[in-house]
Amino acid sequence: MAEQETTTAADQADVTHSDKPAAATWPAAATWPAAATKPGAATKQAAGNASADGGAEALGLRKRRWLKYLPGSRAFWLHTLVSLHDVTMAGLAVLLAFALRFDWSLSAMLRLRGDIVIALAIAMPVSVLVYRFHRLHRGIWRFASVRDLLIISLCAAWVAVALGLVGFFGSQWVLIPRSIPFLVLVLLPAMLGGPRMLYRMVRDGRLIAPPFMATGNRKVPVLVMGEGNDVQAFIRANQIGEDSSYFVVGILTDEPSYQGGELLGVPVLGTLSDLALVIRKLERRERKPRRLVLSNAVLKHDVDQIDSQVFAVAQELGLSVARLSRVDRLTNALEGDGPSLAPISLEDILGREPRRFDISPLSQRLEGQVALVTGAGGSIGSELCRQICALGVRELVLLEASEFNLYAIEIELRQAYPDLAIRPLLANIRDRDHMHRIMAETKPRAVFHAAALKHVPLVELNPCEATLTNVIGTRNLVDAAAGQGVESFVLVSTDKAVNPSSLMGATKRLAEKVVQRAALEHHDTRFMAVRFGNVLGSSGSVVPLFRQQLERGGPITVTHPEMTRFFMTIPEAVALILQAYAIGSQAAPVAFEASSDDEAAGSRSKIFVLDMGQPVKILDLAKQMIRLAGFRPGTDIEIKFTGVRPGEKLYEELFYDSESLDATPVAGLMISRGDGHRALSGVEVLEALQAVAERGDVQHLRTLMQEAVASYTPSPDL
């Protein structure tokens, strides 16, 4: 209701300002009420009032801050007691230094009592100054650390220097032996730091019981695997946290220097390969852990090694597995503080290290230029926009059919690159005339075509829509780009275009053929396609689905136990697309003689193939995600097989058998060559496909698609 009233008031204000009467009807300045001002002046007055209110609020905060330290407040008495303690320790350190210097001789001390008083009169005021300067009195003893000890040592050094200077330059009036400053330098840090460390140890409970036994009956026993700052922070947080959930019974690490040692009182029990033996030993001592905790250092190991040494053993012993969250990343405020356990990210089970590419050299091609990205709000398109912005383009054109996706990526890019010209265009690539107008108005140097309908089961149910978008939309963009002399055109393709069994794969293969045909007909534009498999975490992929099913407690649905897919992270896939663009744009396209259209298409247009590594079984991926969420596959979380859906294959391919792959200067990027590069025989097939798709004639559409893509074998379920 309040929101509705606010909107109404705003609407009325807009009407008032937009429908102002003629100038003659506005009252003169003298006739305005004293408490009011003219429109515009009211805004300034409100801003001034807000500024004054903000200043008053800031002043109030400063007052409340100092009120805490007024006599009678708890903070005042606490800081006073700490200061008195520290100054007293400075005096005692001087007395103890003289006692040590003169072998605890009382007669010698009495004979030098005047010099001792002078030394105290120097050390104690100086200590007050240096303590105040370094804010030693504000340190919280509960969390005393090495940093506090360093500050204490620095304060002791200043006191020792003061005593040394007085003893050296005032030797005619006072006797301060040269050993006194050095003794103070040793004694004072111990006398200041000792009580602080003792207080912390008492509060942590370390003087009462070993840290891994304290309140252990109420905590979950865990075994930590690995080393590093995250392990140390996790152990410390669970030692001092009164409401912490875990206690660490031991550590396993392959670091040789850690073997036989302890970390914060927790013993190092062996290496990763000793997991089964260590668990049996702990079980005999009635300290068997219920969970294995992997550090980020362990996750850098080879995935096969982790699977054989950790997950297989954990499953056999009935242990759940979790990972440590990064200590340098923020988490939701409701999740508690301190290092926590988190599910493993998909990058950790990729089967290989994600590749890192330096795309900065590509800036020479796009810096100061205009780039256009279709499907700019999608998984691949949005990452393309992010990486292209980093290359210093003059203007980035975002072409997207989804209003919300376009809004989201525009807001993100404007915040990250406020000085970059960004042009968001809500448009459908099916509209041929609109595509030509956009190309004519924006005049991009490079077009990255990522817009497509990609979800296999949905495309099988909506074949006409997919054909109009994936095939006809690509043709519209290709013709518009060639007509405006765009330098480079990059089609984002898929491994499902190789020997397609789905209509989605067939439409993407036909889109590749459209690009190859354009390379034959238009010599001023460099046309290329980039073919790759699944990307981790993309919208509509299996990974977000598994996460949602895990959050609901299962079951996890897998189509077939033998189904495999290629996986790659979105950033590395996009980086390779940009690398392919740079390589494909280097050589100027020139006309040449060829024995056939197929040979010419294969020579002039380029299909780049990304090295996706080894294929991953979807069933293994599901089991891995279940384990790393802290559950046991088949026991805690059920895995249900739903059957292969129409259009799906058990495995995907990245290239045809008749194609050969040539290496490029970029590792992980190859060029496909061979008679798999068959261009379209003519545009008639596209016109026929468009006509039957617009009529909604599905059967005729599938027949024409098989004629256009000879390798297309529809699913027998269709």
Image (cartoon, rainbow, N blue to C red):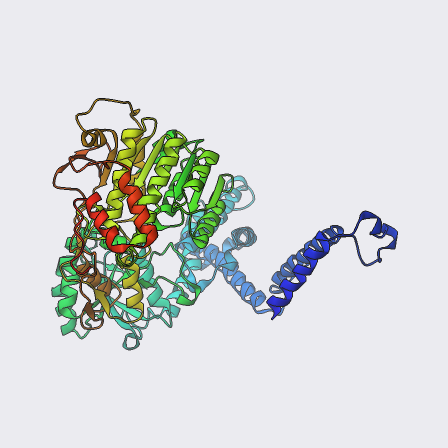
Residue at 37%, 39% (x, y): give it. 477
Residue 106 screen position, x and y as percent? 45, 59
Picture residue at 42% right of the left edge, 67% below the top: 334
Q: Is residue 136 left or right of residue 54?
A: left
Left or right of 269, for residue 142 = right
Up-down relation of residue 87 to residue 241 (above or below): above
> Does the rendering let one see residue 297?
no
The quarter holding residue 434 reads top left
Q: Is residue 330 left or right of residue 319?
A: right
Residue 106 in view of the camera: yes
Q: Residue furthest right?
A: 30
Which residue appears at 15% of the width and 56% of the height? 650
Please say if 422 is above or below 59: above
Work out whether residue 158 or residue 298 is closer to the camera in this orientation and state it: 298
Residue 603 place in picture, x, y as percent: 21, 29
Which of the 4 image quarters holds residue 717? Answer: bottom left
User: Residue at (38%, 63%) from the top-left corner?
Assistant: 338
- Viewer-nearest residue: 552 or 703: 703
Residue 661, given in percent of the width and then of the height, sits at 16, 36
On the image, the x and y values in percent for residue 670 come to 21, 36
Q: Could you say which is closer to the camera, residue 538 or residue 356? A: 538
